[in-house]
Every structure is written in structure tokens, then in C-alpha cells.
Image: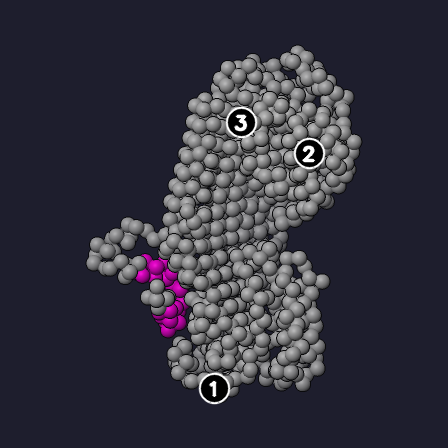
Amino acid sequence: MTEKNHFDGLNYENVYAAQKNMLPGTELSWLNDIRQSSMTKFVEVGLPGPKVEEWRYTNLTPLKSETYEIADKSPSMSADILADLTVQENTGSKVVFINGYFSEAHSKIVSQSGIILKSLPDFLKSDQNSAQALLSSLDKQNSLEHLNTALMTGGYVLQVEENVKLAEPIEIFHIATKGAEAKALRSKCFIEMKSQSSACVIEHFSSPDGFDIWRDNVTRAQLSNGSFLSIYSFQCEGSEVIHMNRVLADLGEDAEFRHQSLNVGGKISRTEVKPTLNGLFAKTNLRGAFLGREGSSHDVFTHMKHMVPQGTSDQIYRGVLDKGGKSAFQGKAYVAKDAQLTNADQSNKNLLLDRGAEANSKPELLIYADDVKCSHGATVGELDDQALFYLESRGLDKNAAKGLLVEAFIAEVFEEIDLEAVKARYLDLARKWLDKG
Amino acid sequence: MASTLETRKKVEEVAGEYKYGFVTDIEMVKAPKGLNEDVIRFISAKKKEPQWLLDWRLKAYRHWLTMEEPDWAMLNYKKPDFQDIYYYAAPKSSDDRPKSLDEVDPELLRTYEKLGISLQEQEVLAGVAVDVVFDSVSVATTFRKTLEEKGVIFCSISEAAQEYPDMMKKYLGSVVPAGDNFYAALNSAVFTDGTFVYVPKGVRCPMELSTYFRINEANTGQFERTLIIADDESYVSYLEGCTAPMRDENQLHAAVVELIALEKSEIKYSTVQNWYPGDKDGKGGIYNFVTKRAACRGKKSKVSWTQVETGSAITWKYPSCILQGDGSVGEFYSVAITNNHQQADTGTKMIHIGKNTSSTIISKGISAGKAQNTYRGLVKVLPNAENTRNFTQCDSLLIGDECGAHTVPYIEVKNPTAQIEHEATTSKISEEQLFYCLQRGLDVEESVSLIVNGFCKEVMMQLPMEFAVEAQKLLGISLEGSVG
């Protein structure tokens, strides 16, 4: 039965029927069962329509009116693309996905004791029991999640053992190239941090301009007691991409999760970050910036769940919208009845650079505990005329002055990053975006 | 913490004391239970309404039949059975309406005395013109003569339908269309009475206008409709208060208020809502589903909503401003207090359409016992609204660990020259503030009262004198013991 507020997903059921033999792991019957049942669940609900509250600012009609099939496996790719994207020196592991498939040729897995890093297709075969457990523990409320499970082709599994510290950040590359036009690229990533472990992941989403692609990536992170995980995300998709990235994190006692994202590409971009603080003293830190102009729509959706006492969460998001750009920030902080002594802060500021820009903000607080400190702030405005005038009077031309102010506006988001190369890349991408305008 | 226990005990004591919970024994004329086109025709005939109004009601009813009850609000309640309600209940003696206060049923007058609004007293001492709506009909309107001299029309909406049909036709449903939402459509179909106010050009209404609503009969719904029109350069301040007897079943109140502010006019609309909130186990109480909306049509017009919400089992209410006129101003000041099992989902919408429009939203939510209190607001700036300004502040206080306070603001901006600020905090009473007061020699009760008064002050200051007294008393009852 299809709910009234959803588009039916029958076209994707047809894709599954026609292309299921192309999916990795077809020889595993348990996997086929999971895929099949996920497909059934997806079809029951369908794609969220504009009347679904969480999707009020992003219209998914294009996914219904056009059917995005699964891309063919790995064409060749020039190594230059990779070199351009790489942030860290060449010492860490690299995991590369081309058009949604793991590319062994371009990837480099550096072995370190206590660390398991595998592509999802490999993991499905080598660790069948744990893979099965992981795939059955997914977000059952989310119909897109079911679709992703049914049709995913790529992804990775990272496991960090107790007390192990990952030596170098891992870089993940989601690259689209020739052959990806009008296709859907889906991946599912699992990160498991055992107690007192620590890791850092840098992920890149890159695709050529003009390619009509649907990208759907899911990352599920499990952080045990005292572990630390930081994810840096660069979304530099092409102009016609529908980009979706969902991050779910489950935090144990004293665990810390950080997520930093920059969104500069795509025609529809949706980033969801949903941390659940299940252990005392857990800490979450979310940072993000989204830059948009004509033909692009950014939607950042966060859902912070404080389930137990003494948790801390902090969210800072900045949006810059030029002519024709549209954005939405929907941030939800939930504090359960038992989560006393929670500190939850949220800040979303938006800068409108020109006519025709649109910023929406919905910072929500849902509080069921009384001894808490929760706050949120949201603003929308334009550049300060006086500040602009001051800079111009110091000899900067208007564009340079504007650029400087915008840079300062978003710099706050990336201020605390201690990896210099990563920080520099964020600012560099922001600057490039500005120069284009 | 001893002080917490102490104050919580006080809350429980206070919770049982709904002092307006009496029933007045007056003979009533009722329409048959349930809702169908005949009931609507019956109401319309009782009111001797013109045909166009009946048609309007029927159209609204037919539209209502196609609608579904909204469930997006953060409220949890048993949906009312719309066929189990009396849609019309009037004191019998109103068949021949009283010509003056002397002719009003003395029993009724005593009711109002109990409420603390003796009509004579009001008329003579306070100088407030009161329109009293008892269940479904407007019982008496005081001070009409004085107002008439100034050209101010202040009468029941049924009278207005007969005497001022042109204005009614022009403005009724122009701000809240008959099919606007589920409850507004229901109200448009079955509204039984309400108030009509017209303030002519250049007139500053010489006194505060006020309406008192009371639901008396069992199983009745109250559906009143208020329409206020402020012509160019006029000013009016309007007060509204409500009570109901204690009953075990839930009673429905679905009102519609429409305000129209023309050029340079100002309307100040204040509400003290004290419907029966149900007992401390959440039994009974009023369902308060109200649609209130103002259109600032003229340049530099201003509408200010002030509300103190202490009653009702369920509150679903979003007084809004459509800022069409250039330079128009919308304000929303709200204190919402929920205790025991009360649930409130309230807030405002500010739609900026004209240039140089500005709006201010100050919302204070206080949640105690097992109550849920939600602020839900929208600030929308359309592409042609240049230089708009909005400031929103929503603060919530939580008392006890079983209640909830939620904030759901929507900000939608399509013009770069807008300056929109929103901030919200949720906390309990600061230990430091409490400690400071205590060490200055105040006891816990006094300290809490002082701090909470300070918390609500920005809103209470907006209330007109006549209401401030009552509102403060209400706040006193609901708040004094409830924070610790």
C-alpha cells in the first residue's frame, strides 16, 4: 500500500527485477533475501513526497519522473582525477569507487594491525555472519534506506580494534565518470570503532558537470566507549547531480563523534546526519557549510538524539546563497526524559548574496528532561554594507571585499580542524566556488 | 532537593483549584445533537440570517466534509466525535433579546459576577465595553451607546449580519477563508455568535472592548467568530477572556478571529485563555482549536497579539499576521503555561509581503507536571518584501522531569535584504538566581515567583491595564508553586 504523501516506487522495483544480477554478491542467497525484502519494504512506502514534513524543502519528483538504473561496472579512469582530489600525502589508505563500484586498481589499502578495511562486496563474502548482522540493523523507518540496501553496489567496512589509533586518515573517493549518466550510484559504509580506538575518514564526492546522476551514500558508524571518529566530507558534485548522503552514528560512553561537511555541488543535495548519544558523557560535534547558486538546492538535515545524561552536542551550520540558490537547514535536537544535564547547542546562519536566493531554516528543539541547557539560534541576512564599504575604502575591489567577508563568514565552521591540509582544502573549495560567481 | 518537592506539592494543590468550574442552571434552547445541513439551517434560521450567509455556511460545511483532521501538531488526544456535540445552545430567554442589562436573566448576571466581571460594575467603574458570549449566543453588549456616538460599531456578529450586510459580505472570510483549515471550515459552517467591531476612519476607540466567553452546557461546542475592522488611522484595543465549568468529558471550542487593519491603523488583541484544563489526571477539559489571523492591509498598519494561555486540555492556536501593507508591523507576545496533562501547541506566523515590514515574536513557554508545551512558528519573507526585519525569541522553562518543552520554528526567506534573527533556549530555573534571591531573605515561593515573573515580564507588560490584573492572578495561581 502506498501512503498518500509518497510517490510510488514501482519504477525502482522494475530496475531491481531487471538488474539484480548485476549487483555484487548475487551468489549469496541470504543477501538476495535481504535485498528482496528491502525492495518490498521500499515499495510499500515509496519515495517521500513534498508533503512529508522532513522533505518539505526538497522535491524528489525528478526521481519519480525519471528512473535511474544501476551503472555498468567500472570503466577506466584517469589517475589525474584522483590526484587532484587527494588531500593527504600518499601514506594513508585510499578506497576508490568508480560509478558506484569498488575499484581495486585505484585503491590502496595500507595494512595496520588492529585495523580491518575492506570494500563492502569483499566483506559480504569473507565475513558473512557479521555482514548479515550489519545489513539487518538498518534504519527501518527510512524508505530510501531500504532502496539503498536493495540496490547498493559499493561501500566499505572499517573496523578499528580496541585501543588502536589509525595512523593516517583514510581517504574515500566516490567518483562518477563516463557511463554514469542517468544512473544511480549507491554505496553503504560501515564503521565500527571498538573501545578507546580512534580514526579519521576523509570522503570525496566528485562527478563531472552536466551528468544527470543520482548518488546515494549511507554511512553507519558505531562508536564504543571512549572511541573517537571524525569524518570530513567534501561534496563537489557536478551541476546536475542529485546527491544524498546519510550519516548515522551511535555513540557509547565517553565516545566522541565529529562530522564536518562542505557542500558546493549538485542540483539537489541532501545531507542527513543523525547521531544518537547512548552513553554517558558522549560528545558530538557537527560542522557544515553549504554554498549554492542558480539551479542548486541544499538541504541539511540533522537529528541529534540525547538518550542518556551528561551528553554534549554542538552544531554549527553556515549557508551562503547566491542568485537562484536555495537552501534548507532542518536541525532537530531531541533530549529524552532521562537525559538530564544535557548541553545541546545549535547555530545556523545564512547569508543571501543576491535577489532570488532563498534560505529556509527550521531549528527544532524537543526537550523531555528538565535539567538541561539547550539553545539554538538562526539568522538570515545579507552582507554588512559598512563592512563592505570599509574594505573597499582600504583599496579592495568589490568582489574581493565580498569574497573576504564570505570567507570569514564560513571560516567559523572549519576553525577547529587540526588537519591543516583538510582545512586548507575546505577554504580553497569555498574560494573556488566564490570565484565562479 | 527540598524546594523542588515543596513547590511540586504546591502545584498539585493548585491544580485542583479551577475556580471557574461552576455550572449555571439556566434553561437552554438547543439544536438537535450532531451535525448535518439541517442543523446549519436551524442555526441560520435562529439567527434570522440572510440567504447569502446560509449559503456561505453550507459551502463551508460541504468543504469541511472533504477535509481531514490535521495531525501534524505535537498533540495527543482522542479526536472529537463531531456527531456527539450540540452545535447550538442558547439561554432560553434570549429568544426575545434583552433590551438593556435590567432584562438580562439575573441568574446569568450572577454567573458573570462569579467570574468577576459584573456587567454593571464593568460598565460603571471600569469603563470597559463587554460583549458576553454564553455558550453560543451573545447575551448582552454593554456601552453600545457611548461607542455609537463615536461611530464605533460593537455588536454581536449575528446582529452585524442583519444590520451591516455589506461590510460582513466584504470582510467575513477574507482573512480566514471558509475552507482554510479543518477547524476554520467547521467554524464557518456552524459559528453561532461572536463579536463584530468596526472602528471608523480616524477614530481612536475611547475604551477597551472586551468579550467574555463561557461554555456552560454539557456536550456543547462553542464556535464563535470575531471580526474586527480598523479603518484608516484608527485604533482599537480588544480583550478576550474565557472560562468553562468542570466536566468529565472533553468539550470543543473552535473559534475563528479575523482582524483587518487598514492604513495607519492599529489593533491590539489580548487574550487571557482560562478554559477548564481538565483534572490532574487529564480527565476532561476543553479542546481549544482556534484560528486567529490578522491582515495588515494598509500602509503602516499594526497588529499586536498578546496571549496568556493557562487553560484548556489541548491548545492548538497560531495567531498570525499577514503583513501586506508597506511598513506594517506585526507583534506576537505569548505566555503559555501547561500543567498536569495539558498540551499546548501554539505560536504564530508572520508573513512578510510588503516592503519595510517588521515583526517581533516573544514566546515564553512554561511546562510543569506531565504537560507538553510546543512553540511552532513561521517567519516567511516573500521575494518583494524589501528591508524586512524579524526578531524571534522563544524561551522555555521546564519544571519537573515528566514534562516536555519543544520549539519548532520555520524560517523561510526569499529576499536578501531581510534581517531575520531567531533564538531559543530551554532550561530550568537557574540555581544561581534562586540562590541569590534566597540569600537576600526571600523564601522559595517568593523567589520563584519573582524569577518567573521576570521570565514572563516582556509579555505581561503588553497587556492592557484592565486585563493585567486578571492575568497576573491567573499566572499567580498557575505559576507560584510550580517552579523549583
- Label 1 with label 3: CB-CB less than 8 Å: no
Chain at numbered mark 2: B
Q: Residue furthest front?
A: B51
Quarter of the figure that contains the C terminus of chain A: bottom left
Q: Residue A234 at x, y = what percent? A: 44, 70
Residue occupying the point 38% across, 71% down: A425
* Magenta segment boundaries in residue numbering: A403-429
Residue B48: quadrant of the picture: top right
* Tally of numbered tags: 3
Chain at numbered mark 1: A
Disc 2 designates what residue?
A: B190
- The mark nearer the N terminus, 2 or 3, is 2
Please identify, in this view, whether the residue under mark 1 or under mark 3 is nearer the observer: 1
Q: Residue B111 at x, y = what percent? A: 68, 21
Amino acid type assigned to the residue bearing label 1 in the image: Ser
Q: Using a 10 Å C-alpha cutoff, classify the residue at mark 3 as few (fewer than 14 neighbours), some (14 to 19) or many (20 or more).
A: many
Residue occupying the point 59% across, 15% down: B121
Q: Residue furthest top?
A: B102
Viewer-proximal residue, B20 or B216?
B216
Amino acid type assigned to the residue bearing label 3 in the image: Tyr
Give the Cα separation between the discs numbered 2 and 3: 24 Å
- Magenta stretch contains residue B236: no
The verdict on a common chain for dots 1 and 3 is: no
Disc 1 designates what residue?
A: A76
